[in-house]
Amino acid sequence: MTVAVNKLPSATSPENPVRAALDDPAVIDRLGQQAHAILHRRIDVRGIEINDVVQRTILRAIECRASFDGRPVGAWLHGVLVNVVREEVRAAHRQPAQQPADSTLWAESAVAPPPQDADVAAIRTLVEQHLVRLSPDDQAVVRMRFFDELSLQDIAVKLNIRYVAARMRFSRALRRLQELACTTPEERS
Amino acid sequence: MTSNDRSLWIDFVAARYLDAIERDDFDAQLELWRVAETNPELLAAFHDIHAGLIAEENEAAVAAVDAAAGKHLLSGEIIQPKGRPVTVADIANELFHHTPDRLPAEAHALNERLRAVSESLPDDLGFSRLMAWAEARFGSAPVGYWKAFYAALVKLDLRRASETEYQLAARAAPKSEGGT
């Protein structure tokens, strides 16, 4: 997908990584994909244009670049886009919009918390306890990934599907496992 | 953490990201993007999720057209692309369109369920092994259903083989050196 955005005055330099990233068409394209992925199924925000979201993200990033601390800029821009979408959705719901000067929320985007590793052992337990309750298609992909230790690429080849489709199938199967783990036996029956 | 555990962790966090998008949980999305800042593999996995959601949207649009054609053009059949392996759903759809006589209700119920199964069939199974394979995966059904299932598989295999032969026969012959 190619997202058309108005070019901003260029100031590409190593000292200005935010502007350098915003001058990269691949970065803009990925922001457009993210906006599309978040917004495409929301019937309540049909009026929001993907190009507008990307454009606002660029403006926000430039406004906030002073607080940017030099981390990899790609993921930071995606975080800025999440905040832009949040504002757009609030506005579409006619709720009081977050003020542009809400420095707390925007400042949070520029501060990375310590990563929290998911407990792989806990995921294995989840799989062992609830696997048989999944549909045959979901069971097959989870078995291949956990027990046969096939990569998603190998699973894609085996199922004759594309790599991203294998990732989506595995992701949804994990989600259903977690839903099963959260239901009571009465709810299951 | 082993390399496989690390790779599983990436897949698990990517699944959490998909969940956060589908639940419109912006706080969770923001938190996960912060985790991805220091992890290029995770960043790539999140981009895969975007690509996957967009691809699903496109596939849903195509499926809606297929469904409308199936609903309003009752005599029509959707011809699937050539070169793709036969799936359980292909066979169940064939049985749906050309249903054998005297199948019991539970066989119809199972067939309806199998129309959604996209798994490919193992190669070169005879009837007995096919029935064992299918019952292990999808539950038991009357033998008559599995016979019809096997017959439909053979029919689809033959149809695809003949399409392949036709394509080979229809290729332009290479020109001889003499130009004749």
Image (cartoon, coloured by chain):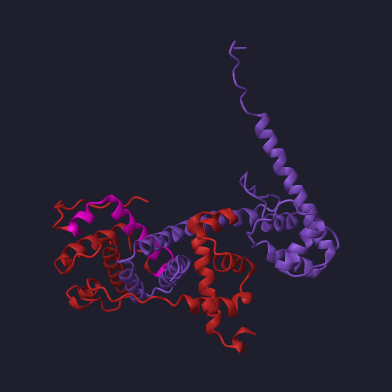
Chain colours: A red, B purple
Q: Is residue B169 above or below residue A33?
A: above
Q: Residue at x 69, y 34 (%)?
A: B166
Q: Position of residue A159 (x, y in %)?
A: 59, 56
Q: Quadrant of residue B62?
A: bottom right
Q: Nearer the viewer, residue B81 or A92?
A: B81
Q: Where does the magenta region start and end? A: A17-44
Q: Residue at x 13, y 57 (%)?
A: A15
Q: Quadrant of residue A117?
A: bottom left
Q: Quadrant of residue B116?
A: bottom right
Q: Position of residue B164 (x, y in %)?
A: 67, 38
Report the quarter where the C terminus of chain A lies: bottom right
Q: Position of residue B125 (x, y in %)?
A: 76, 54
Q: Position of residue B171 (x, y in %)?
A: 62, 28
Q: Residue at x 20, y 78 (%)?
A: A104
Q: Residue at x 15, y 51 (%)?
A: A10
Q: Quick check: can you spot residue A39?
A: no
